[in-house]
């Protein structure tokens, strides 16, 4: 079911705030940006910003959290009879088909933003939350696909392994010299999961 107009406007505002937080932090450095700057960039009040995010670090990482939610939803939407491994691979490869960059985010901003997140101590906790969001979204979808109870460890282990594989591929992509495309690295990382 498609979200209504009000929900779409809220999603658009949230996405605009997240993109502004990321872009401004890349341009000025993490410490050079205030919540007021982000809100002004989008044309809303700081109070509106605080309705969506508890901190600028959370706003900067919001696009990656959205990716985690999309991945979980996409895995749930795969054909029911498809083997789990094939469903996971198809889901993650589709998610990274355009590279690491979410829709509507300039490549250079995303690339620089990822580097900033990984290098800024104040961002590290939020980055771990993003990683946990991906694992949770995948684990929940895996449990549903397999019809397992929430107490089963298998979905958590597989979801965590898939998230770690994608994380490893992203780190390799960020530091590749010369630059390389991300999707083949994700494909290789997922293939390594089947080797053990």
Image: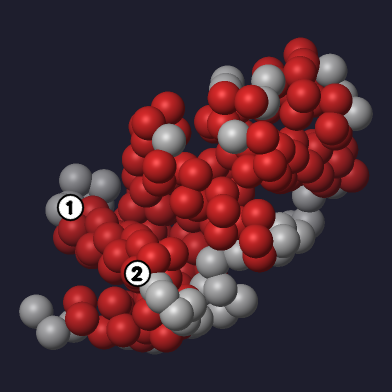
- Residue 63 spot, x, y in % from top left: 60, 49
Q: Quadrant of residue 87?
A: bottom left
Farthest-out residue, left: 196
Q: Secondary structure at mark 1?
A: loop
| Most foreground residue, 17 or 32 | 32
| Most foreground residue, 130 or 110 | 110
- Residue 139 spot, x, y in % from top left: 32, 56
| Picture quarter with the N terminus | bottom right
Quick check: 9 above or below 170? above
Q: Which residue is mark 1?
A: 152
- Residue 158 spot, x, y in % from top left: 23, 64
Taking the image as shown, residue 18 lies to the left or right of residue 175, namely right
Residue sitting at x 30%, y 78%:
190
Taking the image as shown, residue 5 lies to the left or right of residue 175, namely right
Q: Which residue is mark 2?
A: 172
Q: Quadrant of residue 166?
A: bottom left
Residue sitting at x 26%, y 47%:
150
Residue sitting at x 41%, y 53%:
134
- Residue 13 appears in the picture as rendered: yes
């Amino acid at each position: 079911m498609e979200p209504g107009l009000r929900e779409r406007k809220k999603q658009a505002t949230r996405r605009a705030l997240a993109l502004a937080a990321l872009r401004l932090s890349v341009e000025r450095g993490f410490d050079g940006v205030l919540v007021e700057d982000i809100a002004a960039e989008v044309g809303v009040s700081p109070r509106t910003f605080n309705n969506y995010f508890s901190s600028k670090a959370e706003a900067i990482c919001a696009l990656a959290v959205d990716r985690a939610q999309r991945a979980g939803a996409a895995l749930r939407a795969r054909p029911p009879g498809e083997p789990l491994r094939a469903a996971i691979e198809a889901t993650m490869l589709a998610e990274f088909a355009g590279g690491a960059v979410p829709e509507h985010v300039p490549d250079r901003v995303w690339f620089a933003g990822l580097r900033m997140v990984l290098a800024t101590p104040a961002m590290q906790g939020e980055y771990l939350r993003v990683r946990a969001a991906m694992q949770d979204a995948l684990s929940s979808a895996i449990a549903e696909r397999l019809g397992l109870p929430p107490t089963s460890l298998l979905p958590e282990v597989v979801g965590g392994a898939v998230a770690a594989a994608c994380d490893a591929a992203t780190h390799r992509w960020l530091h590749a010299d010369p630059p390389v495309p991300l999707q083949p690295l994700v494909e290789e990382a997922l293939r390594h999961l089947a080797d053990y």
